[in-house]
Image (cartoon, grey):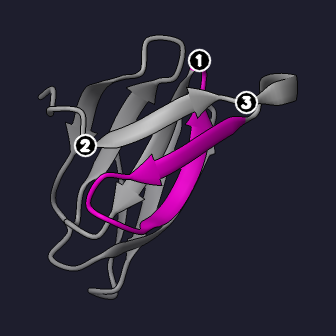
Amino acid sequence: RVESARTRVLAAPRGGVAAYGGRGLLLAVCSLGGGVLAAELDKTIRLWRPAEGRCIGSFEGHSDEVLSLLTHRGLLLSGSKDKSVRLW
C-alpha cells in the first residue's frame, strides 16, 4: 500500500540518505536495495525511493512503535516496543 508523503527522504553526499519525519522523530532507518526503510511513531515502516522522494509501500502490523530495522538478503526484520519481532 502506498502512503502519502509525510516523511522526506533526500539523497545525501557519498550515497548516504538524510531523512526526517513529517510527524516527528524517525525511530529507525535502514537501506534496502535502492530504497530506504523508515520507522515512524505511527507504528508503520515505510519504503522510500530517495531519488524520487516518494513512499512506494508500507509495512503494518506492530501494535507499538517500531524501534529497530534490519535487512539481510532481501528480508526485513523489525523490532517493536510491543516486544515483538516481525519477519517481512
Front position in the image: 54 or 33: 54
Front position in the image: 30 or 61: 30
Asked if disc 1 and disc 2 are in contact, CB closer than 8 Å, the reply is no
The quarter holding residue 83 reads: bottom left
Instruction: Give, as a three-letter code, the residue at label 2.
Output: Arg
Query: Which label's residue is closer to the chain start, 1 or 2?
Result: 2
Residue farthest to the top, as pictured: 52
Distance Cα–Cα, label 2 vs label 3: 19 Å
Question: Is 48 above or below relative to 79?
Answer: above
Can you identify the residue that label 1 sits on? 34
- The residue located at (42%, 69%) in the rendering is 25
- Nearest to viewer (mark 1 / mark 3): 3
Q: Where is residue 21 in the image (x, y as percent from the top left)?
A: 38, 54
Range covered by the magenta-colored residues: 17-34
Can you identify the residue that label 3 sits on? 12
> Is 4 colored magenta in this rendering?
no
Can you identify the residue that label 2 sits on? 6
Question: Is 63 above or below relative to 43?
Answer: below
- The residue located at (29%, 76%) in the rendering is 65
